[in-house]
């Protein structure tokens, strides 16, 4: 994951940092990320503005959390975790259930199935 290379023309006794913005020699294998050299020899990972990386996988904007219908990938809020849908968003299945603080609840505060 480092951006150091052997460049004997520049320095024969130590490794040389690749130029800032160069591609890192090692990729994380995710299609929604890019790794570029930061100039100090470290790799910096950037996530596409239309994706989140959650549990080591690319998740597209708007994708619902499989274990919570009141959370989605919203890169404007977080690119590394699901974000709560807006309060009042109707829960899947309709009825009297709406999202409140990231959970599906009935208007009287009771949990929805």
Image: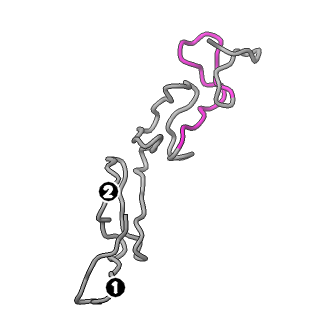
Percent across and percent down for residue 93 are 54, 12
Q: Is residue 29 left or right of residue 94?
A: left
Does residue 5 sit above or below 78 in this rendering? Answer: below
Percent across and percent down for residue 31 are 32, 47
* Residue lying furthest right: 108
Q: Is residue 31 left or right of residue 95?
A: left
> Range of the magenta residues?
81-100
Mark 1–mark 2 distance (CA, rounded to whole Å): 23 Å
The residue beneath circle 2 is 27
The residue beneath circle 1 is 14
**Residue drawn at x 37%, y 68% as measured from the top left:** 2
Helix, strand or loop at mark 2: loop
The answer to whether mark 1 and mark 2 are in CB contact below 8 A is no
**Residue drawn at x 45%, y 44% as measured from the top left:** 53
Helix, strand or loop at mark 1: loop
**Residue drawn at x 42%, y 63% as measured from the top left:** 44
Quadrant showing the C terminus: top right
């Amino acid at each position: 994951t480092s951006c150091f290379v052997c460049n004997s023309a520049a320095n024969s006794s130590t490794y040389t940092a690749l130029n800032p913005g160069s591609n890192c020699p090692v990729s994380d294998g995710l299609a929604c990320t890019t790794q570029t050299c930061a100039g100090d020899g470290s790799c910096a990972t950037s996530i596409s503005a239309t994706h989140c990386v959650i549990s080591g996988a690319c998740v597209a904007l708007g994708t619902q959390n499989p274990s919570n219908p009141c959370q989605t990938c919203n890169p404007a809020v977080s690119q590394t975790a699901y974000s709560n849908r807006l309060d009042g968003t109707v829960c899947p299945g309709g009825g009297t259930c709406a999202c409140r603080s990231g959970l599906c609840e009935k208007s009287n505060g009771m949990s929805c199935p």
